[in-house]
Amino acid sequence: MNKIAFVTFLLCSASFMYSQDTGLFHNHQEFTKQDSLRGSITPERAWWDLTYYHLDVNVDPGKKNISGKNTIGYTVLKPNQTLQVDLQPPLKIEKVTQNGKELSFSSEANAHFVQLKKQQKIGSYDEIVVHYSGHPKEAIRAPWDGGFSWKKDENGNPFVATSCQGLGASVWWPNKDHMYDEVDSMKISVTVPKDLMDVSNGRLVGIDTHKNSKTFHWKVNNPINNYGVNVNIGDYVHFDGKYEGDKGTLDLDYYVLRDNLEKAKKQFKQVPKMLKAFEHWFGPYPFYEDGFKLVEVPYLGMEHQSSVTYGNQYKNGYLGRDLSGTGWGLKFDFIIIHESGHEWFANNITNKDIADMWIHESFTAYSESLYLDYHFGKKAASEYVIGTRKNIQNDIPIIGVYDVNHEGSGDMYYKGANMLHTLRQLVEDDEKWRSILRGMNEEFYHQTVTSQQIETYLSEQTGKDLIAFFNQYLRTTQIPVLEYKLKNGTVKFQYSNIVADFDMPLQVVVNDEKKWIFPSSEWKEISVKENIQTFKVDEDFYVETKVLK
């Protein structure tokens, strides 16, 4: 067994045994068959590989209605005559065709099972066309609840956008709505009233003008996850730029409401600074072929691939607030930095199951700190990420329940970021840490992955046994507590509130001198030459402390 395979075996075995011993993954929430149809790789999904989409949709802002079709191209992996397509009510499938012939289908809430007439042969490519229409779910508090945002700008013009992470892209268009299988490429055609513009993912390849409407055609050349696909409609104006990056010239395009043009030109100067920092830490922007866009929307923002949406009111911080309370959070526009960070973690590296959403959010929340590190220094970065700990709830584990479309705790943001910041300290080599982060984006380039794959990669590349480390921070709500006693020239210490085998080293300061200690569940001690005046754990480690008498 090679080293990587062995580490994978250890991670899987330890995680399973730990969950069995503690009952950690026993979830009292009851899941339905519909949860399984949405969140698992059903037999009706598993037999075909998603290859191509052409989403062609007409959007009527006045009636809050959409209608259109999606062509789904696929390659047959094994014989089957039933294909699952997902579309959420109140939208309805009008018909499904293949090679011009109408197909029958049955429906079970959001899941629709198409009966194919043509014999499906292994290795063959084919397409179905799903026609649909209706009034899609309206997002009440986008982007946290998905659907369409039907708003108006200050001049009374329609201002419309989609967002659908978690709830799923099937809330507004028919697709294979599971994260494990990304489409290889995609065309998006959106018809809107003639005085408006649609901005979607990829590059604009054409505009058709009709009597009362226009159709905007966009082409996505890279794999894209379903929730990353978006429609943004408004009275937009456009300006652009170029960025000379790791893979050459990257096209930058900005679409904002007409009245906000001057504010946007000033605020969006942060985009090249973001790209400079993130290409340094994570490697090349993953979608040079599709360019980078920042698009104003009527909600806060979202990481739609190559079409990042922005609604942070042209303010630094999070709507003008510093989430860390340190002042460093006001040095950058949160939405520009955070949502763009997702181009590497969510869009380049994508979780297969939303239970592993920490892969998206922990690394991206941590990217905020790394942005500061690049532009303002390591001290600023540390103070920021440590400051975000006050936002951690420790309510439920970061990893959710698999196969039922169930995400874990919102702590995946800042508990996850502090976990990664702690891991950086254990590496003790910032250039090595940087190479690990860049290596991740190369190793898993344009792939969907599991938590175990990422955990294995980090264990292998750091050369450390991180099984207990990840079990502690991802699979429990327990924060390690270093208990210690001071007496004369001796420090006695042990960990409490830990999982089995957790023995993470810590850097401490004793009488102004830095030392490494190696706590475990058993008492240990160190001695110094003189009486101990001060003892403090380095704050860069996400642990709690308790002094005992």
Image (tube, grey):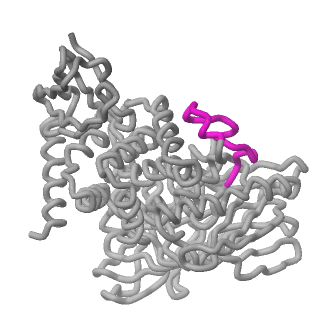
Residue 535 x %, y %: 30, 23
Residue 460 x %, y %: 23, 61
Question: Which residue extends farthest right?
Answer: 155
The quarter of the picture where residue 189 lies is bottom right
Is residue 166 visible to us here?
Answer: no
Q: Nearer the viewer, residue 317 or 61?
A: 317
Using the image, determine if residue 457 lies above or below residue 474.
Answer: below
Q: Nearer the viewer, residue 340 or 451?
A: 340
Left/right placement of residue 417 relative to residue 159 reads: left
Magenta region: 310-330
Query: Residue placed at 16% from the left, 22% from the top?
Result: 492
Query: Residue placed at 66% from the left, 47% from the top?
Result: 333
Q: Is residue 321 magenta?
A: yes
Left/right placement of residue 115 relative to residue 501 reads: right
Question: Which residue extends farthest top?
Answer: 549
Does the magenta stretch mainly form a helix, a strand or a loop?
loop
Left/right placement of residue 327 relative to residue 237 reads: left
Q: Is residue 434 magenta?
A: no
Residue 156 x %, y %: 88, 50
Using the image, determine if residue 285 lies above or below residue 330.
Answer: below
Is residue 275 visible to us here?
Answer: yes
Quadrant for the C terminus in the image = top left
Using the image, determine if residue 319 lies above or below residue 259.
Answer: above
Q: Nearer the viewer, residue 231 or 468?
A: 468
Query: Residue placed at 73% from the left, 49% from the top?
Result: 298
